[in-house]
Image (cartoon, grey):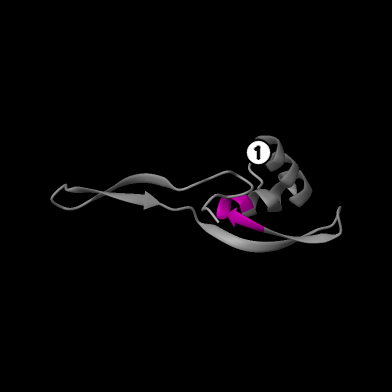
Amino acid sequence: MSKICQITGKKAMGGCNVSHSKRHTKRTFDVNLFRRKFYWVEQDVWIELNVSAAGLRTINKIGLDAALKQAAEKGYLY
C-alpha cells in the first residue's frame, strides 16, 4: 500500500538532508499516516482507510460521509 492519504491525497515528497557543512543528500518527507477503521452510518458498514493527521481533522470537521464524497470526486479513494 502506498503512502497516500485517501481523504486529502497527500503523498510523500522528496527533498534533501542538509548537513552542517551544507552537503545535500536525498531523502523523502513521508506523510503522517494512520490505518484507521471508521463506522459509516449511512451504509451501515465498517471501512478501513489510510488517513493522514490532516485527513482525520477533515473527517472530524465535515463528517465521514461528506469527506468520502469529496475524496471520491477528487479521485483519492482506491
Q: Residues within 10 Å of mark 1 (few under 14, many from 20)?
A: few
The local secondary structure at tag 1 comes to loop
Residue 50 part of the magenta segment: yes
> Seen from this angle, which residue lies furthest top?
73
Image position, residue 33 (x, y; %): 54, 57
Residue 75 location, quadrant: top right
Q: Is residue 72 above or below residue 45?
A: above
Residue 23 part of the magenta segment: no
Image position, residue 72 (x, y; %): 71, 40
Q: Report the quarter where the N terminus lies.
A: bottom right
- Residues in magenta, as a range: 49-55
Q: Residue at x 52, y 53 (%)?
A: 2
> Seen from this angle, which residue lies furthest left?
21
Mark 1, residue position = 75
Decide if residue 30 is on the left or right side of residue 41: left
Q: Residue at x 37, y 50 (%)?
A: 28
Q: Residue at x 75, y 51 (%)?
A: 64
Q: 45 or 21: which is nearer to us? A: 45
Q: Residue at x 64, y 47 (%)?
A: 7
Q: 57 or 19: which is nearer to us? A: 19
Q: Amino acid at mark 1?
A: Gly
Decide if residue 18 is on the left or right side of residue 53: left
Image position, residue 29 (x, y; %): 40, 51
Q: Is residue 40 above or below residue 7?
A: below
